[in-house]
Image (cartoon, rainbow, N blue to C red):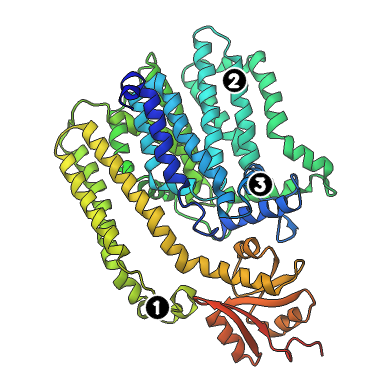
């Protein structure tokens, strides 16, 4: 090992990144159940496609669903074929994409930035809280970010080649191919964001004509259409309703999401600034300092050109989604690689200069870790008093149906956080950017490791897993082609995923409608909460409790109420 590090330091760094983030992203990936709503939504669609051997038409609860293109679904179907239909199978490809992105940043940054800086960028990106979260959950953003990053790198290589009087066509065609894969992942933004970035970049350096070379543009468009539009065209020509799905996919989930808030997901124009500051900690505290110290004007420097290109893409992503009416935190994931590259350059300095910038950034990181430690110590007391704090609202929360016992875990985690904060304070006083970076990396890995290896499983056992246990019990009472009633349970695709059954929603305000549902032959049981079961009984409808787990109840109506009259 010592000879490997000495003779092949880049190989050693690559293997370290692979091992470190392979463990962080894969370990315990199977333990938390799929989470409602988004992850359950994607996992269930891909499960239905997988069981039906269907590769073109996504469906949810037995009905066609064209909210997203199929790249994630295809990846999850691969996961199911390798590991079975379970949470690990649903998340495997996403975790793999997260690992690939960390390694990719290291590989593509070595030449323009240097091996040390690109290694630091990979550590920054891979250890940030938000990036770890998105690598360990089944959503479209990690695959999209991987394809975007590959597209950007090859587009940048093409432009660099052209500036040296070389053709660069192969690189440009490859960039178009990855833009096509991005389109198959999340639609029109797959080509929109890279195209805007390349256009603005070429415009600023006075080389816009390069983009319109016939050897670039015509084959590039053909490649983009062949890959990016492949699913859209195949589905349109083979589906009985033709291209009608385009209305849901593009009008509703593209234009309407941009023009007005959907499903209550709105926010102020600075929404993503807050998301970035919180989700990219502790590194977000140092990003403004890196931007201040970075040199942008020296276009003769390959390092500057590389950073400028990737940061331009991050800016395009930030501005687009900040203007958009519908806002979700995960939307800015594609902006993170460029920001990580910028932040890493800060730690190239030989010594800490400037009194206030470094001190403020380090203090912010320390306060974050210290705050997490203090929160862990007071969490048991907060949890114990939640019913009194929430009042009547607590009755509607299934997690509070039983007392919550956290044991010694919060105190152990809190102590580790506080020790880590002290370690950061000591490192910050040494005036060495390299030493501070090492301390920050260790701190970030400690924080994310505890949050996702300890905190999330505890949360899952209290909030998410009880519903899946009830869903699995419901499956035992329901025929394969039957349906399960969800009474005031909201949209719960995880119930479909774990029960392998369809569901139908019902309301407490329409008890007669509930009776009619239970009179249908394919419906045997329903799922609700303790609170709404009590409300249902107050309406005069008699129920039988079949199973319960922390506030969720499996029930059926009495023989009298489910008999057709």
Q: Which mark is residue 81?
A: 3
- Whichever of labels 2 and 3 marks the residue nearer the N terminus, that label is 3
Where residue 65 appears, as percent x and y from the top left, is 71, 53
Camera-nearest label, 2 or 3: 3
Circles 3 and 1: CB atoms closer than 8 Å: no
The alpha-carbon separation of the residues under discs 3 and 1 comes to 40 Å
Q: Considering the numbered disc 2 on the image, is that residue within a helix, a strand or a loop? A: helix
Q: Quadrant of the N terminus?
A: top left
The alpha-carbon separation of the residues under discs 2 and 3 comes to 34 Å
Location of residue 523 with respect to 334 vertically, above or below: below
Location of residue 112 with respect to 540 vertically, above or below: above
Q: Nearer the viewer, residue 366 or 407?
A: 407
- What residue is shown with label 1? 403
- What residue is shown with label 2? 172
Where residue 40 appears, as percent x and y from the top left, is 59, 58
Camera-nearest label, 1 or 2: 1
Counting other residues with Cα less than 10 Å from the Cα at mark 1, is it few (<14), some (14-19), or many (20 or more)? few
């Amino acid at each position: 090992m010592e000879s490997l590090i000495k003779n092949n330091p880049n190989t050693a760094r690559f293997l370290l990144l692979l091992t470190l983030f392979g463990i962080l992203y894969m370990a315990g990936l199977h333990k938390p159940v799929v989470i409602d709503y988004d992850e359950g939504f994607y996992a269930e669609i891909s499960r239905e496609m997988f069981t039906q051997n269907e590769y073109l038409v996504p469906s949810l609860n037995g009905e066609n669903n064209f909210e997203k293109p199929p790249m994630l679904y295809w990846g999850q179907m691969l996961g199911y074929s390798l590991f079975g239909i379970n949470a690990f199978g649903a998340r495997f490809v996403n975790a793999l994409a997260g690992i690939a992105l960390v390694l990719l940043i290291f590989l593509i940054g070595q030449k323009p930035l240097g091996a040390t800086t690109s290694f630091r960028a990979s550590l920054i990106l891979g250890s940030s809280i938000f990036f770890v979260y998105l690598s360990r959950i089944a959503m479209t953003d990690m695959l999209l970010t991987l394809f975007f990053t590959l597209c950007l790198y090859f587009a940048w290589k093409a432009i660099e080649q052209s500036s040296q009087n070389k053709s660069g066509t192969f690189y440009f065609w490859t960039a178009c191919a990855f833009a096509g894969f991005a389109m198959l992942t999340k639609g029109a933004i797959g080509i929109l964001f890279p195209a805007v970035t390349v256009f603005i970049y070429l415009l600023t350096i006075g080389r816009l004509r390069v983009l319109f070379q016939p050897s670039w543009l015509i084959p590039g468009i053909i490649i983009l259409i062949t890959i990016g539009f492949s699913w859209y065209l195949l589905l349109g020509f083979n589906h009985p309703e033709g291209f009608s799905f385009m209305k849901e996919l593009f009008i509703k989930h593209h234009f309407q999401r941009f023009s007005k808030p959907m499903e209550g997901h709105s926010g102020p124009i600075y929404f993503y600034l807050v998301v970035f500051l919180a989700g990219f900690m502790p590194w977000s505290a140092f990003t403004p300092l890196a931007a201040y110290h970075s040199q942008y004007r020296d276009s003769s420097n390959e390092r500057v050109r590389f950073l400028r290109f990737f940061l331009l893409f991050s800016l395009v992503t930030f501005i687009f989604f900040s203007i958009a009416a519908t806002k979700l935190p995960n939307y800015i994931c594609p902006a993170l690689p460029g920001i990580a590259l910028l932040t890493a350059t800060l730690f190239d300095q030989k010594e800490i200069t400037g009194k206030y910038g470094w001190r403020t950034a380090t203090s912010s990181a320390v306060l974050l870790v210290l705050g997490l430690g203090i929160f862990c110590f007071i969490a048991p007391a907060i949890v114990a008093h939640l019913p009194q704090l929430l009042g009547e609202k607590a009755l509607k929360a299934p997690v509070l149906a039983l007392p919550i016992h956290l044991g010694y875990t919060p105190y152990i985690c809190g102590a580790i956080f506080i020790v880590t904060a002290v370690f950061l304070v000591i490192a910050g006083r040494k005036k060495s950017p390299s030493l501070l970076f090492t301390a920050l990396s260790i701190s970030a890995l400690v924080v994310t490791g505890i949050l996702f290896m300890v905190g999330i499983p505890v949360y899952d056992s209290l909030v998410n897993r009880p519903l899946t246990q009830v869903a699995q019990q419901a499956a035992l009472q329901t025929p394969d082609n039957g349906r399960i009633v969800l009474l005031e349970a909201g949209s719960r695709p995880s119930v479909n995923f774990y029960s392998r059954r369809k569901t139908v929603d019902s309301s407490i305000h329409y008890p007669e409608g509930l009776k009619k549902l239970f009179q249908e032959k394919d419906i045997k049981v329903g799922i609700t909460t303790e609170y709404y079961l009590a409300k249902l009984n107050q309406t005069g409808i008699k129920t039988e409790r079949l199973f319960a787990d922390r506030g969720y109840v499996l029930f059926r109506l009495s023989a009298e109420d489910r008999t057709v009259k």
